[in-house]
Amino acid sequence: MHKPAATLHDGTISQSLGLLIVLAWLAVHFLCIFGPPLANWHPLALVGVVLVQAWLSTGLFIIAHDCMHGAFAPGRRGRNRTAGRAALMLYAGLDYDKMAPAHFAHHRHVGTHNDPDFNADAPSSPGRWFLHFFGNYYTHMQLVRITVVACIYMVLGASLINFAVFWAVPALLALGQLFFFGTFLPHRHSASPFADQHRARSVGAGGLISLISCFHFGGYHHEHHLSPQTPWWRLPDARKTLPA
């Protein structure tokens, strides 16, 4: 497997981009949850903000994902762990320390019964696969954390409806985005065989669509499996240097 060494310069860019994503997510989160009631929103503006927040929520997960592989802060294990924990908590109250081992199992056993991201009983069915995928990562503690935050926000004056629309809905949309573009399409079984033992394919032509769909983890998914230490924003360049 080709594993180019991550540089401090890469880490600076990754952390700068990560900070921008987090700040943008926090701005939308607090301004909208503690902002005007939904009745005061124009429908198009409401849909637009929810979709932007869903994309930013996907970005939070991608930050945590890069942290798992040490690509967020190369050589800084503690910083990666801290940033990853924070990103997943913001995203949907997820436990980084439980998700990281599962993600490494995905890389070790990709496309097999031992792969927690894969449904070997329905390798071409997005519906059954998604239920399996969701069941592997949902925990009751996640729901408890979200409920506690919701109660605190309501005590501080937030609307429960705003909380649901501007946090829960974007998180669920991001889950669908991560699953469909970052897991199902790259790893599904089809008439075209996989290129190698990674059982992963890159979907589409890449570029801006790849960035919008899943921070390049659909358009350059095979490249990610060839070089897990490559940060998300460098995956398009990795295609030029990694073996075909």
Image (spheres, rainbow, N blue to C red):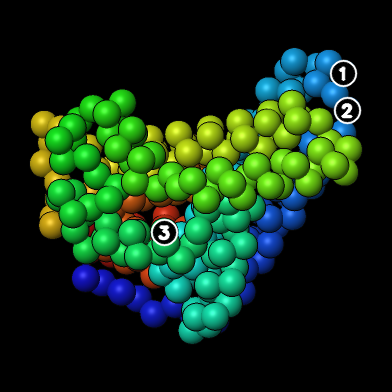
Q: Is residue 42 shown left or right of residue 210?
A: right
- Tag 3 secondary structure: helix
Is the residue under label 3 in contact with that under label 2 (CB below 8 Å)?
no
Q: Name the residue under label 1.
A: 40
Q: Type of residue at label 3?
A: Met
Q: Mark 2 points at which residue?
A: 36
Q: Earlier in the sequence, mark 2 or mark 3?
A: 2
Q: Which residue is drawn at 80% across and 43% down?
A: 153
Is the residue under label 3 in contact with that under label 1 (CB below 8 Å)?
no
Looking at the picture, tell me which residue is in the foreground, 76 or 211: 76
Q: Type of residue at label 1?
A: Asn
Q: Mark 3 points at which residue?
A: 99
Q: Which of marks 1 and 3 is nearer the N terminus?
A: 1
Q: Quadrant of residue 44?
A: top right
Is the residue under label 2 in contact with that under label 1 (CB below 8 Å)?
yes
- Tag 1 secondary structure: helix
Q: Residue at x 69, y 29 (%)?
A: 165
Q: How far across and how far down the image is residue 67, in percent?
A: 49, 67
Residue 191 image label? none
Residue 203 in sight in this render: no
Q: Is residue 127 above or below residue 227?
A: above
Calculate the distance from the C-alpha at mark 1 to the C-alpha at mark 2. Answer: 6 Å
Looking at the picture, tell me which residue is in the foreground, 235 or 147: 147
Calculate the distance from the C-alpha at mark 2 to the C-alpha at mark 3. Answer: 35 Å
Q: How far across and how far down the image is residue 104, in percent?
A: 31, 64
Q: In this view, does 181 lie above or below 22?
A: above
